[in-house]
Image (tube, rainbow, N blue to C red):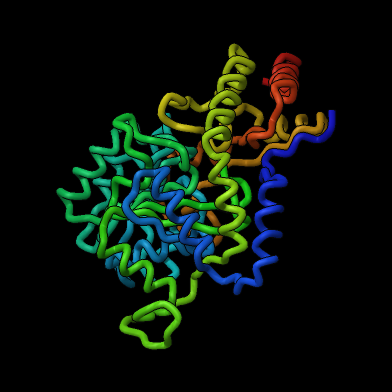
Amino acid sequence: MDFIMQMRPWFGEEEKNAVCAYMEEDGFITEFKRTEKFEKMIAEYTKAKHCIVVNNGTVSLTLAAMACGIAAGDEVLVPNYTMIATPNSVKMFGAVPVFIDVEEETLCMDLEKAEQALTAKTKALILVTANGRYPKAGIGAFVNFCKKNNLILIEDSAQSLGSCYPDGQHMGTVGQVGSFSFSAPKIISTGQGGALITNDDEIAYKLRRLKDFGRSGGGNDFHDSIGYNFKFTELQACIGIEQMKKVSKRVERKKEIYSLYKKGLAGIRGIKLFEQDIEHTVPWFYDCICDKRDELQTFLKEKNIGTRLMYGPINKQIAYQVSGEHKVSETVGKKGLWLPSFAQLSDKQIEYICISIREFYDTGNR
């Protein structure tokens, strides 16, 4: 079988034609009407009042924090299992990420451990809905916790487009602001890109000015606040519009792939697929805990199957080196593996992957 990548974006003729058609218009390429249309599509899909797109999903979190009033020196609770962009986004302007371990079942922040980490400097909590999953404690528990402790709740929903909480609210719409990523591995992609959604008019106003130099209005050089340049482009928007037209079908296919993996890996001792509520949520990647993970990864590579190590505990990364023991995130760092996860996977490829994993564990590699 040809090599099966762990991930790959999915662009087609529609995206190519949209970009070419735009270039025939002699547009300025910087964000304008196509970007507005893309924002409107995201807002309608998530049922959010406002959507603001920016150049990537890390900056989106930075702007979310700044628009909510988080400042240098403030402590922000973040999960110890996440993409490093989450803590980096607030560290960028001098806020202090405080690492919290995650729930074993969901890999979302452990609320009890968050409560233990509160100090007088704690200003906000960033909830990462890991792989589109919601915390076992429930989103309501996080909302109440933040209200009780006067904390800002930001939802890092980078991996959660298409995923909802059991009450039907799309992830990213419950906190003060939610953030999505459109980098190459995501369900839809614009190469790079991020989106912020909020139902708060004031936060939306601040976000639009923060991303555009603090201008008092479009296209002028008069500034009533400090801002930066994190704008989108019309070329990205052309791609994003076509991608959004396909999102519902991709969501369904991702759920189908999860069911095929679950069936194909059932009964294999040595590997455990993380559970996913596919009625309400969509897996971004197919994540599992594996015995002899590194050996399995090598074995699968020899079978032309690509995999990827899951995030290691951030506090132990060289970039941070923060003291503390976080059992769950450390276990994931040692045993976590992402299986091939792109939406174009065929049923035949998934069957081959599962048979290969079974072969590894059935030949005495447990």
**Image coords of residue 289 (percent x, y):** 56, 29
**Image coords of residue 97 (percent x, y):** 38, 59
Which image quarter holds the N terminus? top right
Q: Could one spot residue 33 in this view of the protein?
A: yes
Image point (46%, 49%), residue name: 41
Which image quarter holds the C terminus? top right
Image point (37%, 47%), residue name: 172
Using the rendered view, name the quadrant where residue 106 is placed: top left
Q: Could one spot residue 360 in this view of the protein?
A: no
Image point (35%, 44%), residue name: 47
Against 144, residue 353 (above or below) is above
How many numbered dots are placed on residues in this image? 0
Image point (61%, 46%), residue name: 185
Using the rendered view, name the quadrant where residue 104 is placed: top left
Nearer to us in this view, 114 or 62: 62
Nearer to us in this view, 198 or 124: 198
The residue most toward the top is 267
The residue most toward the front is 25
**Image coords of residue 102 (percent x, y):** 40, 40
Nearer to us in this view, 22 or 254: 22
**Image coords of residue 223 (percent x, y):** 36, 85
The residue most toward the bottom is 222
Report the side of 78 relative to 10 (left or right).
left
Against 195, residue 363 (above or below) is above
Nearer to us in this view, 272 or 127: 127
Against 363, residue 154 (above or below) is below
